[in-house]
Amino acid sequence: MTTTSPFPHLFEPLDLGFTSLANRSLMGSMHTGLEEEKGGFKKLAAFYEARAKGGVGLIVTGGISPNTRGRLTPLGCQLSYFWQVEKHKQVTEAVHKYPTKICLQLLHAGRYSYHPFSLSSSKIKSPINPFTPSEMSARQIKGTIKDFAHSAKLAAKAGYDGVEIMGSEGYLINQFSCVRVNKRTDEWGGSIENRMRLACEIVKAVRAKVGEKFIIIFRLSMLDLVEGGNSWQDVVTMAKAIEAAGATIINTGIGWHEARVPTIVTSVPRAAFTWITERMKKEVSIPLVTTNRINTPEVAEQVLADGHADMVSMARPFLADENFINKAKEDKSNEINTCIGCNQACLDHVFKQKRASCLVNPQACYETELVIEKSKLSKKIAVVGSGPAGMAFSVYAAQKGHQVTLFDKSEALGGQFNVAKQIPGKEEFYETIRYFDVQLKKHNVKVEFNVEKSANSLIEAGFDEVVLATGISPRKLDIPGFEHSKVKTYLQVLKDKEPVGDKVAIIGAGGIGFDVACYLAEGKSLTTDKDAWLKSWGVDQDFKENGALLTESIHEKTQKEVYLLQRKTSKVGGGLGKTSGWVHRATLQKNGVKMMAGVTYKAIDEQGLHIEVDGKAQLLAVDNVIICAGQEPERSLYQSLVDAGVSTHLIGGANVAAELDAKRAIRQAAELAMTI
Ligand code: FAD
Ligand code: NAP
Ligand code: SF4
């Protein structure tokens, strides 16, 4: 070991023979949306350059299609023509100012293409896409292999150090390798040798085009996590063939996009799937990369030290903090802005065709637009409220050189994040509070707790600017019996830990209603018990069946009987995040929570909650009714400050409580700080 780093395995260079990587970190492929934006490559170059400057060893770009029909969306990014090379050079030249290497990911979406011209191994529609693919002819298959090789050649011309061939997550190559979609009877279907032929032929064709001194990563689906997925023997056969075909590195793919096992959301235990890469290490001799929910240098180091892989792939952690690697190297891992696995600003944006960013780092993918520069004038600024909005604003403003004092009436930093982190599976939210705590100290922000600021005290102190980040108050409802002792707010339950009976009705099925239901019904958190978590979601670590799924999941339910109610007639939980909502719904279903839509609340009394559904009266004979019916802004100080002529700003919940989340709160904080 050549380094004295606190993370010796993470910082050990990796010799690939013809080239070497500075350390064992790989920034996993992420589509940002900049790829398709007008002028987006300049911004993309700045995005990748920041990560290269931050010390990452190897970057893999977002998926780029080798041909038109393989594009993810009708106008999705493709690399097939010489004229496209120039824009990619902006990226590679920016990255190569640093010792970081960069590979272009080649991704043919197959039946995941969101357009009517999609192709697949067989004509079978995916459950997550309305378009039915056409079955590829043998000619189209051969053409596609050539297209991959041609794109790889163009990638080399553009200055990339290699390519990653996307063979997992249920995309085209995976659609060929598994019988789930591949029903062919020709040389491309049937036995594993036939089903993996497309993958092997692509690797061979790419190698033939680019020569020996070019990195070829193959992303292999080691756990399909779907019915009709491959057996372990199939996966091993394929890995060996991919190695023989000329791949330099094999990266681990976990689960098809249509799998009903969560693989990356916050409730997935850290490094929950690295055991499968460890298993593969006995089978091949080229370096293996492991992945999924590795979000701190400590976890990355442990995975490498345990011999689970030769490299670790982290994607979202580099959105959250571009300096992740350098901070780890300097033994400052407590200064890292940790990815909390929420998906709210990254994947949820991409699925809505919006530019990706990061909830905890709104500058991600906005490197050239959301710039915090030193201010010419150092102002005296008061920030009231230390929730996400107040913490973030204070740090950004202090970075600009302002003198900031942050007040909170409570005894701790974090506002509602202190409540969110109590929910089973949301423990990561603690990391955001830890990050801001360290940054506030680092930037000399004066923090005063247990101080309920009045407008007068702020006026008298003579601040140049006052920022109100005072958050929200839970909404009060106009239901007969609302004052009954059965009724509790979510804060009484989650924050004050008031006891709750075994039969509970929750009014309001937004994010907080779901979280309260999970808190009551799930009981203990499984995020620190990997084995129990995997069993609970039906994953078989012994890999007895194809796809590594258990015939039945093993999950312990609590005794609580929980009803989660909403007035809307739409699907309960329909408004939750695109990529995480289904996990919340499935978690509650596993715990027997009864979700009801189209409810009218009539009254609360000794008997319980009286409701009407479809015109029929019902009594839910519950011990408690918990109110999770949204919030109102808490900004009682605002008008007096404005009337006194104080320059006052509202951010976060204090500004607009409706549809507020931490993503908006933190972004608004950054945008205000930029202008002050
Ligand atoms: P808050 O977090 O409410 O902070 C306001 C602060 O102001 C508090 O600390 C309060 O003590 C202080 N304050 C108020 N008045 C005064 C005064 N006069 N003087 C001094 N201090 C004062 N959001 C997401 O994006 N994703 C999630 O997954 C998510 N999960 C959640 C789960 C739960 C259980 C809860 C309760 C919330 C969740 N949220 C989530 C919402 C998120 O926490 C809020 O949107 C966010 O905290 C709002 O930030 P804020 O800074 O505006 O206000
Ligand atoms: P919310 O998402 O706005 O949900 C409020 C719920 O209360 C809705 O289900 C609404 O449904 C109901 N409601 C509203 N007014 C009502 C009234 N007068 N009487 C009865 N019911 C009423 O708010 P929230 O759950 O409080 O969450 C606050 C914010 O935190 C949200 O913006 C959310 O994004 C964020 N959050 C996110 C997550 C996450 O996982 N991403 C988790 C927690 C919180 P009906 O009108 O149909 O009854
Ligand atoms: Fe991680 Fe959430 Fe940021 Fe995405 S938005 S990178 S999941 S913290």
Image (cartoon, rainbow, N blue to C red):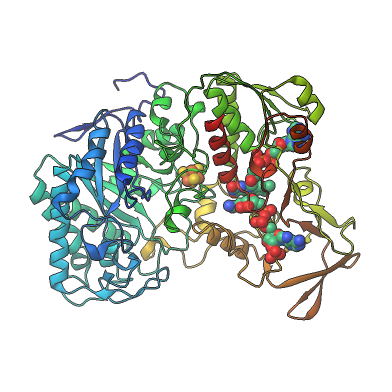
User: In terms of depth relative to the viewer, which is nearer, 184 or 34?
Assistant: 34
39, above or below 72, in the image: above
Q: Is residue 358 left or right of residue 243?
A: right
Along the line of sight, the residue nearer the viewer: 400 or 228: 400
Going by the image, does 54 lie left or right of 484? Answer: left
> Is 577 displayed left or right of 209 in the figure?
right
Q: Residue at x 57, y 29 (%)?
A: 676
Relative image position of residue 336 (x, y in whole percent): 48, 30
Q: In the rendered image, which quarter contains the N terminus?
A: top left
Q: Where is residue 356 in the image (x, y as percent from the top left)?
A: 43, 48
Observer-nearest of 414 and 568: 568
Residue 499 visible in image: yes
In the image, residue 113 above or below residue 378: below
Residue at 10% across / 46% down in the picture?
A: 210
Q: Count all numbered tags in the image, as a single digit.
A: 0
Residue 419 visible in this rendered orientation of the protein: no
- Above or below, 272 relative to 397: below
Q: Position of residue 468 (x, y in %)?
A: 69, 35
Question: Closer to the camera, 196 or 280?
Answer: 196
Question: Which quadrant of the structure image shows residue 126?
Answer: bottom left
Q: Which percent across, then down, holds residue 575?
A: 59, 61
Residue 146 appears left or right of 329: left
Q: Quadrant of ligand 2?
A: bottom right
The quarter of the displayed image where residue 142 is located:
bottom left
**Residue drawn at point x = 74 percent, y = 34 percent:** 642
